[in-house]
Image (cartoon, rainbow, N blue to C red):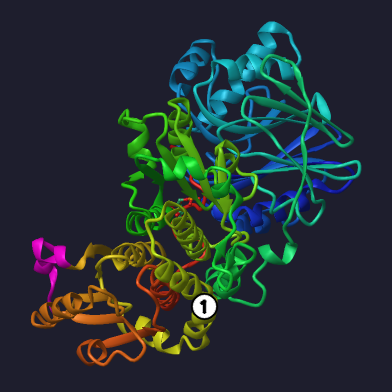
């Protein structure tokens, strides 16, 4: 939530920061702004709307300077507007600051500052924190770094802040707690950002700043300190990411590119781990902790959004293949309700970004209670990856489209391998089924390729139903979470109201909605529930509902009953979601496109939700 970029070095800072903001726009895009220092002169440019609007707004203005900070916002405190856009300036005008996160006790601090005569130009918590720092600096007559330390010790909440000051014409001051910050190490220059995507084209050497650390960043010097003013040794990591991975590569949208990347990303996820011929799965995170899984009394899966849906599918997989009870929790609910966690419980955290605030905080408290945390994460080096005791990366590459697609199938591939590996070691899956599922899993990338070969039928269906105001998505068993995911994708991308439901449960309510205007999407591939779902389709048709079915190639019944069909190749039901979700991703993409919406940046959403 909110993207942050900073630069200090010999280059012109503005274009570097602006380009970085475009790369981080998936984190928020309701307003943006950049502050640069030019010979000690602070210039701030900000604009409501997407980064392109800021770019247009500065045409003809002097944006020179070799040090700059920039921000793309997802509003928390105060509506999206020029006034609330970051960077904010302190009362004296000397300091400029950007912030990702939420200062929870800002009202109290604001009251204190108001009583001292401060006034505020915005409604943000950021401006409060900034003036708080300025006030401490003035009263204590101390260096800025010291004032930051004092202020941050009083702050409750999450933050990643970058600060520049006319008094320090070459230095960016940064600090984080709960919101991510990466520093790229160049030759005589430094880059700061919320993730590595703005940095990758300049350097692959990065330092991930830890919570409660302050970074003092000059062109040729990086100092890290904790809030106790003790120096910390920066740990330099080499990025394993190419620039091409974060560009559109000829596709109209990141979402479409990412949908089409799935044969490769699933293959990359399985590569080196799944050895179907020799009947092996190699996953060091599981191997090194096999006892914890085998002896687990229960597994709790914690996640949000699409990752939560992957968790629901994992529940079916783990319970079937490993016979371990699984609970799937929304991180935001789990963390606040004082859950019962025993040492020996295994928590699986699923997160694309590895930065989702609710998931992160839920894990921190579970860790304190002695649970073993296993992370299924896409973003390498992210906060959740680092907090986990062990884990498995999904290797899906950077996902830029706000609605998750390839990360979801990467999660499913990892979770399927985990369930197979644990179940086999535990003896809860027989040799034949184990071998069969390995071969099935290995064939998934080719089958996804087949679905993606010709998407014109899905595009046609999308155009046909684009004016619908509601959709119902139904599925049973492994396909029930796929129905939920299909509904979520459609809501996110097309702004059409959609509900996902277990197909049998529809009789207890949603069937009342069915009439000739309601498209009902059935995820009805050939599995052990097939006969039952055929009956459910009939129940909808009897009430004049319009049925769109995801069905298995060669099926002769469902296509005859449905108004429209999207076919997928046959697969074992335990891994069929890896296929049945693909037409639903495409359906939402093409509906959004047909409605002329910004599919990569749907309104009000952000990719990485780093506020609670
Ligand atoms: C946001 C994104 C979703 C994502 C969810 C969880 O809502 O828009 O696509 O599924 O956050 O994010 P995570 O990074 O933890 O998977």
Whole-percent x and y of residue 23? 65, 56
- Position of 116 with respect to 56 (left or right) is left
Identity of the residue drawn at 46% across and 21% down:
105
Residue 48 seen in this snapshot: no
Which image quadrant: the C terminus?
top left
- On the image, which quarter does residue 473 sit in? bottom left
The region drawn magenta spans 504-515
In the rendered structure, does residue 508 fall within the stretch colored magenta?
yes
Nearer the observer, 445 or 598: 445
Label 1: how many residues lie within 10 Å, few (<14), some (14-19) or many (20+)? some
Residue 453 position within the rendered picture, expressed as x and y whole percent measured from the top left: 52, 87
Residue 184 is situated, as x and y percent measured from the top left of the image, at 78, 44
The tally of labels here is 1
Residue 367 is covered by the magenta coloring: no
From the Cβ of disc 1, is ligand 1 less than 8 Å away?
Answer: no
Residue under label 1, please give it.
443
The one of 486 and 349 positioned closer to us in this rendering: 349
Q: Secondary structure at mark 1?
A: loop
Q: Main secondary structure of the magenta part?
A: helix
Q: Position of residue 133 (x, y in %)?
A: 63, 19
Tell me: residue 385, above or below residue 440. Answer: above
576 vs 497, nearest the viewer: 576
Q: Residue at x 50, y 78 (%)?
A: 448
Note whether residue 323 is visible.
Answer: yes
């Amino acid at each position: 939530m909110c993207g942050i970029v900073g630069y200090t070095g010999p280059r012109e800072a503005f274009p570097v920061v602006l380009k970085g903001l475009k790369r981080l726009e998936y984190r928020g895009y309701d307003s943006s702004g950049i502050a640069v220092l030019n010979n000690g002169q602070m210039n701030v440019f900000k604009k409501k709307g997407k980064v392109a609007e800021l770019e247009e707004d500065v045409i003809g203005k002097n944006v020179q300077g070799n040090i700059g900070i920039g921000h793309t916002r997802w509003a928390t405190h105060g509506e999206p507007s020029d006034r609330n856009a970051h960077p904010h300036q302190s009362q004296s005008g000397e300091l400029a600051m950007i912030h990702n996160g939420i200062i929870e006790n800002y009202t109290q601090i604001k009251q204190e500052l108001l009583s001292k005569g401060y006034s505020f130009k915005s409604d943000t918590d950021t401006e409060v924190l900034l003036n708080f720092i300025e006030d401490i600096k003035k009263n204590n007559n101390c260096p800025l770094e010291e004032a930051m330390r004092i202020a941050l010790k009083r702050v409750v909440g999450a933050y990643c802040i970058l600060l520049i000051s006319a008094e320090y014409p070459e230095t960016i001051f940064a600090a984080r707690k709960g919101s991510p910050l990466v520093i790229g190490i160049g030759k005589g220059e430094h880059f700061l950002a919320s993730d590595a995507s703005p940095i990758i084209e300049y350097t692959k050497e990065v330092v991930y700043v830890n919570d409660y650390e302050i970074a003092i960043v000059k062109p040729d010097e990086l100092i890290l300190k904790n809030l106790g003013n003790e120096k910390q040794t920066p740990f330099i990591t080499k990025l394993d990411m190419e620039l091409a991975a974060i560009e559109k590569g000829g596709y109209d949208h990141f979402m479409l590119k990412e949908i089409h990347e799935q044969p490769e990303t699933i293959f990359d996820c399985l590569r080196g781990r799944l050895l179907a011929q020799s009947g092996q799965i190699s996953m060091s995170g599981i191997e090194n902790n096999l006892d914890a899984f085998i002896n687990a009394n229960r597994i709790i899966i914690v996640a949000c959004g699409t990752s939560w849906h992957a968790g629901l599918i994992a529940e079916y997989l783990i319970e079937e293949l490993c016979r371990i009870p699984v609970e799937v929790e929304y991180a935001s609910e789990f963390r606040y309700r004082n859950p019962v966690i025993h040492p020996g419980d295994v928590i699986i955290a699923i997160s694309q970004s590895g930065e989702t605030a609710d998931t992160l905080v839920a894990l921190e408290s579970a860790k304190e209670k002695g649970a073993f945390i296993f992370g299924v994460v896409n973003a390498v080096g992210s906060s959740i990856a680092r907090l986990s005791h062990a884990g498995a990366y999904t290797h899906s590459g950077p996902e830029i489209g706000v609605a998750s697609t390839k990360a979801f199938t990467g999660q499913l591939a990892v979770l399927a391998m985990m369930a197979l590996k644990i179940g086999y070691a535990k003896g809860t899956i027989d040799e034949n089924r184990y071998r069969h599922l390995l071969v099935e899993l290995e064939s998934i990338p080719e089958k996804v390729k087949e679905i993606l070969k010709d998407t014109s039928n899905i595009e046609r269906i999308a155009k046909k139903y684009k004016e619908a105001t509601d959709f119902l998505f139904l599925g049973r068993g492994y396909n029930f979470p796929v129905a939920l995911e299909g509904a979520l994708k459609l809501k996110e991308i097309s702004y059409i109201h959609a509900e996902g439901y277990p197909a049998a449960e529809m009789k207890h309510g949603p069937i009342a909605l069915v009439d000739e205007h309601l498209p009902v999407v059935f995820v009805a591939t050939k599995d052990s529930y097939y006969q039952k779902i055929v009956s459910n389709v009939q129940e909808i048709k009897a009430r004049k509902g319009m049925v769109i079915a995801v069905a298995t190639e060669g099926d002769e019944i469902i296509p005859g009953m449905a108004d429209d069909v999207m076919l997928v190749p046959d697969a074992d039901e335990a891994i069929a979601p890896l296929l049945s979700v693909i037409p639903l991703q495409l359906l939402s993409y093409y509906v959004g496109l047909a409605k002329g919406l910004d599919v990569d940046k749907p309104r009000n959403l952000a990719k990485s939700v780093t506020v609670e």
